[in-house]
Image: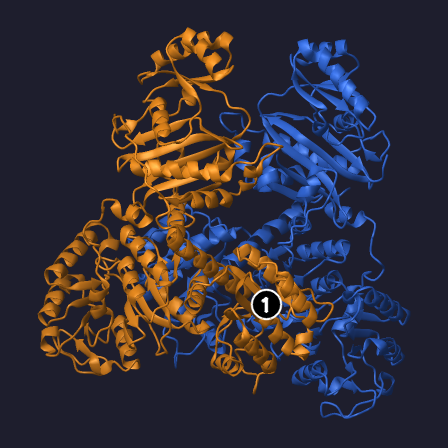
Chain colours: A blue, B orange
């Protein structure tokens, strides 16, 4: 049975051999070392200094060996001239030597029994053709030695669970936490760790990936999904080097209930692909990534702050049972901003049920409004129990799956017990009695300090997010992720396979008539029509097809018939003979062979959709749909997903269009039969998947819909290779 | 001459008399008091405690008098039983007494010569009809005593310039700064001040407004525009009580080069108005506010963080000369996110000119790319002068008006001189040599601590924003504001007035024929056509108007002719007589009087626009335009602005549409004559403005455009009052 994972894994690996997967078990000897050798250690290098300072600060100095070619005292310690001279078992060699000395250093490490290398040095694949050659040689050498290497061109990693920082990013000792941080950028990871520290986002691992010569983000992700201390993974990506493995790892994360949050640069570079089909122009790299992330349940964010806040929230909450967020606040002003912020972030703030509202009416002063977000009013500052009880009541609402309590929280001591402690304690009591998880939200972003921890500990507040916007974005994302993960489990295997014979040479662009037959065989409705063989036959077709008809040239070599004048609409019987002859004459003037002339019924008013499948070189077949014409062309209003697309998902995609209201009927027209349309779209996807790896595009444009009548008016099928 | 200010001020004041303007001079005795009486001071009230603690902390205790009815010792000080008993001149009475005691307390204060009251107490207009009555009585009493009052239902104000906190919001002594903070919410202002403190945003004033019974946000804004210490004003608004004065104050701020930044709740409540014209449904309250803000050069933001960061930036920068932002960073990863963030924030990052690129190529390593945002590469960490020189080069680019340098900045000491100080110093040197203002940006949001200030002072870095997103939003907003302020100055008076006779009864809805005459008189092109008086006349019209024509009923009582079957398109000469009769017969069945039948030319393929003017009850005539049909209906794609709208502004509005690409021609059609179209739109606005206060809507739907041919196909003119 076809499913997304299979589909994504079925395609050929276009890798250059430098990124084959390294399994989690093998990685644990790298990421959980019992001892480390700093190779190329020298007082002159800042990288060396920082790496040693980190190890020393975490109490790992005794298990750290410094290797200096000349054996000179370094960082106040004695050194050895080579790994072989250490004479003790070592798990990881941290290599800071020059590119020229690298292969020998690897050999030396291997000879000392070291099986893992962390290669800081740059000048490899990131630095042009020579660098790429050097990187291939590096990987080949490591493989020949049975070694695994992280990098090159990065800043190492830190395992905070085992207190093992093997990195040249400054880190300070801390309690480990549930968030693992993966980054392809070394220069930005320092900012991410600093921000995690400020907001009290506990880290399990920090791993910089660099050029990913052997260990890709996907490999590291797999390792972290299996790591028991990690409950969410935050990733900063510039490119995905191993789409198949990344997809597999992401699905494993979803199955494990561990959210993967990605900040990926390149959103604004909407580089559209050139492709035969119209769909191709819609499908930019970044749109494909977003669609694939959605299908995999991977959460995408836009800033470092949202990356860390959302990962922290996800690790704390795990999947939530219901998407609705209940919000309780002591500030009416905050509620107004909250409603706007929630709407902008896509957070679902359900209306409270009647029982909830009745209970709140009984609890709160008469001037309070029992709505979501709830303003408990200033009365709660005088009587904190109102806050406590409002939380309990809202937590019992049938639509609420998680709650946010918006209030103030200090980070700088005002010289004693916090003046707002009584209110915070009441919130804590409310949280203790709540039926759903509750997040405490400070209105603006600020540090989570030691003083903050004291206040939270006394009040019994388990989790704090600072900043309304960050809290709403994080809750909205984790809420949507929870739904997506649920669907990934429920809908897997929903799509039955489809078998078609697809007679015809699978090369170049097929004629429309061949495409029509293919659709018909797959059970996709096509507009009534037939090939006509003469002027008289065209006149006869008018009678059969009901009055005026469309006449079009049929030619495998002409993808865009309208552009060459090969489509004539609304041809009446009186004109059919003449028009037929004109099209035959036109055929004589074309470069391509004319296969004949097709007559089809004219459709009446209705909606014209674009439904197309194109092959992305990295992620495989992608299905795009939109309302045709200016909607997709001007507004870029379309939905995109990797195959397979179930009819349930197709319906969601249709509903996600900004043009969705037209599906309910425009200007008095009938509403579209959405389930029927969704089933047709599912079949288009199934057909494309069935047609094998040679298919480059299958596009129905337009797919005409009027109520429950659905007809493909034109179809383009194209294959790799020329006819 | 008509201009926005005039237009906004010309309308009747619908106020209830409780919000007439209090001028800046009068307000200075309130906001710059030499002494303060806390009336109703008691140890049992937290409001009283906080207010006194604030005054004491700022060294104002000696000029503070505590008034306690029973004369009991309060806050460790002796008290007097009434203001009259103080025996010294006092400028402000801070009234914390109950509503029942308020009028007497006011009388007592007045008797003691106090001319300003700050009324904390609640239960006034915010609390229903009784409260509203109490508030009217309060204002009337204050007026009768010659007093001015701030509030009620708020938390006071703090003047940080004169170190005078007259508020029950906890504030700590600080150096005054250039940002004034106005807030209608008392409960959220604490969070705003705390955030300003954290980010080092210096405040001149903090004023909470409450119910604005006498002093509105507009009055306070006027005062702050004239205050020499204030260079930007941040406002949290829930409603604008005094649109006319607000508009005047905002224009004064723009003229003074002081940005006004507004966080206004209610963006998500898109409550559409009911109105006869289609335009009315488009124009929600919030869209009107946004359009008015744009016209006034008021900056709108979405979060407390952006409010304070943008105000701080605006105060520091003032208007920038060019909109382009040059970005220099040491992190390639940050550059990727930066480009995305800038695009999302609408920040203009121009391509560098050839001279800039050549100079950067010479300066930087060969693997660096001389683009904006610029990654100076890791080489700059080893050779900081690269950073310095890159800043200098980029600052000289002809398109760059302001720069952002993205790097790291500490807020927690790492136990000595910061390890990154050398790089920071190089940045400081670059800033000193820069030709444009330069902002230092830390990648993530964090506090500006004493340690941060030390680093900045040594390096000579004048201004820091923490957080890429906040920096890009702030720079984009201040950059756009600078342009808007420039345009407000340049374009004032660009629009010449228009005089039309507009013969006809200005009541109800006019017939289409009357509307057509009105447009024609105003020089707005209408589709050729004439009234026809018989079937034969309709046939004749076919000949005159070129083949098939449109026939429509003309009736003042029918606003939507199509809905009743009163429009027949593409009528050929052979059918014209019959159709004419059918329309006459239809007229007989309508409730409204049929004025006749109108024959007009049929237009060919072209673009159909909607151009409408409706009257907003608060802000006056608003012009809306969009591409007709589903574009405006489904995508809500329209532009909105208060009148007057110059042709230059109309062209900008057209370009701002998401549908703007269709103006350049779709599917082989001609490009629209944009200047010509913009002139027609300007005339529509002028005509509406000329038609006087009775006009409720003037809508051309559609306005047909094909290349430089522009014709109003249908027009609706409606007036207040029924025919």
Residue shown at 23% from the left, 54% from the top: B125
Q: Tell me the subunit letter for badge 1.
A: B
Q: Estimate the x, y position of residue B163 in percent, counting from the top left.
A: 29, 77
Give the residue number, with chain letter if any, for mark 1.
Answer: B394
Residue A574, located in which quarter of the rendered image? top right
Residue A677, located in which quarter of the rendered image? top right
Q: Quadrant of the C terminus of chain A?
A: top right
- B709, above or below B307, in the image: above
Q: Is mark 1 on a helix, strand or loop?
A: helix
Q: Nearer the viewer, residue B672 or A676?
A: B672
- A285, above or below B205, in the image: above
Q: Which of B79 and A265 is in front in this view?
A: A265
The reply, left or right, for residue A302 in relation to residue B480 is: right
Residue B107, located in which quarter of the rendered image? bottom left
- A513, above or below A210, in the image: above
The reply, left or right, for residue B623 in relation to residue B59 is: right
Residue shown at 75% from the left, 54% from the top: A243
Give the total of numbered labels.
Answer: 1
The reply, left or right, for residue B117 in relation to residue B527 is: left
Q: Estimate the x, y position of residue B458 in percent, counting from the top left.
A: 52, 83
Q: Quadrant of the N terminus of chain A?
A: top right
Q: Estimate the x, y position of residue A394 in percent, counting from the top left.
A: 43, 54
Q: Estimate the x, y position of residue B542 in percent, counting from the top left.
A: 47, 13
- Residue neighbourhood size for the residue with mark 1, other residues' Cα within 10 Å, grouped as few (<14), some (14–19), many (≥20): many
Residue A181 in view = no
Residue B719 in view = yes
């Amino acid at each position: 049975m076809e499913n997304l994972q299979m589909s994504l894994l079925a395609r050929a690996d276009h890798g250059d051999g430098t990124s084959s997967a390294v399994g989690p078990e093998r990685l644990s000897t790298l990421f959980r070392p019992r001892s480390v050798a700093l190779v190329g250690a020298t007082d002159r290098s800042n990288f060396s200094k920082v790496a040693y300072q980190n190890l020393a600060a975490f109490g790992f100095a005794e298990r750290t060996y410094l290797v200096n070619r000349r054996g000179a005292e370094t960082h106040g310690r004695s050194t050895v001239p080579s790994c072989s001279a250490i004479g003790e078992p070592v798990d990881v060699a941290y290599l800071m030597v020059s590119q020229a000395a690298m292969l020998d250093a690897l050999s030396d490490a291997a000879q000392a029994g070291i099986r893992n290398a962390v290669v800081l040095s740059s000048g490899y694949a990131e630095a042009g053709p020579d660098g790429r050659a050097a990187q291939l040689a590096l990987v080949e050498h490591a493989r020949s030695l049975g070694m695994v290497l992280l990098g090159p061109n990065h800043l190492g990693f830190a395992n905070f669970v085992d207190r093992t920082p093997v990195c040249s990013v400054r880190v300070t000792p801390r309690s480990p936490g549930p968030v693992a941080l993966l980054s392809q950028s070394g220069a930005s990871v320092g900012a991410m760790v600093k921000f995690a520290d400020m907001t009290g986002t506990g880290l399990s691992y920090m791993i910089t990936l660099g050029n990913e010569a052997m260990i890709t983000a996907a490999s590291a992700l797999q390792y972290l999904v299996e790591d028991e201390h990690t409950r969410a993974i935050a990733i900063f990506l510039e490119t995905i080097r191993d789409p198949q493995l990344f997809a597999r790892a992401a699905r494993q994360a979803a199955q494990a209930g561990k959210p993967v949050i990605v900040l990926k640069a390149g959103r604004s570079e909407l580089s559209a692909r050139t492709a035969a089909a119209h769909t191709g122009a819609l499908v930019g790299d970044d749109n494909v990534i977003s669609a694939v992330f959605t299908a995999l349940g991977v959460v995408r964010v836009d800033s470092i702050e949202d990356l860390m806040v959302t990962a922290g929230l996800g690790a704390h909450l795990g999947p939530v049972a219901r998407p609705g967020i209940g919000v309780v606040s002591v500030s009416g002003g905050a509620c107004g901003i909250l409603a706007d912020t929630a709407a902008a972030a896509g957070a679902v703030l359900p209306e409270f049920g009647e029982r909830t509202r009745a209970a709140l009416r009984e609890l709160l002063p008469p001037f309070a409004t029992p709505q979501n977000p709830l303003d408990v009013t200033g009365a709660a500052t005088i009587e904190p129990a109102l806050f406590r009880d409002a939380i309990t009541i809202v937590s019992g609402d049938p639509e609420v799956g998680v709650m946010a309590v918006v209030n103030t929280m200090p980070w700088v001591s005002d010289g004693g017990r916090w003046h707002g402690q009584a209110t915070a304690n009441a919130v804590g009591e409310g949280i203790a009695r709540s039926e759903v998880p509750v997040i405490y939200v400070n209105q603006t972003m600020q540090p989570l300090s030691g003083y903050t921890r004291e206040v939270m500990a006394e009040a019994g507040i388990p989790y704090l997010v600072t900043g309304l916007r960050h809290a709403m974005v994080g809750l909205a994302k984790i809420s949507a992720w929870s739904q997506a993960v649920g669907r990934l489990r429920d809908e897997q295997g929903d799509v039955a396979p489809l078998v078609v014979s697809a007679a015809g040479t699978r090369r170049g662009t097929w004629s429309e008539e061949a495409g029509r037959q293919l659709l018909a065989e797959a059970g996709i409705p096509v507009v009534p029509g037939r090939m006509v063989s003469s002027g008289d036959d065209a006149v006869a077709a008018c009678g059969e097809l009901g009055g005026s008809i469309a006449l079009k040239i049929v030619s495998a070599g002409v993808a865009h018939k309208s552009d060459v004048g090969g489509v004539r609409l609304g041809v009446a019987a009186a004109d059919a003979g003449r028009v037929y002859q004109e099209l035959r004459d036109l055929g004589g003037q074309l470069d391509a062979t004319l296969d004949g002339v097709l007559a089809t019924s004219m459709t009446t008013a209705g909606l014209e959709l674009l439904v197309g499948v194109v092959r992305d070189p990295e992620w495989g077949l992608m299905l795009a749909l939109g309302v045709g014409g200016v909607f997709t062309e001007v507004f870029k209003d379309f939905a995109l997903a990797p195959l397979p697309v179930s009819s349930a998902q197709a319906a969601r995609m249709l509903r996600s269009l900004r043009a969705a209201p037209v599906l309910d009927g425009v200007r008095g027209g009938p509403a579209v039969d959405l389930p029927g349309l969704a089933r047709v779209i599912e079949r288009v996807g199934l057909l494309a998947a069935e047609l094998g790896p040679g298919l480059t595009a299958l596009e129905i444009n337009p797919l005409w819909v009027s109520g429950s009548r659905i007809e493909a008016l034109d179809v383009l099928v194209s294959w790799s290779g020329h006819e």
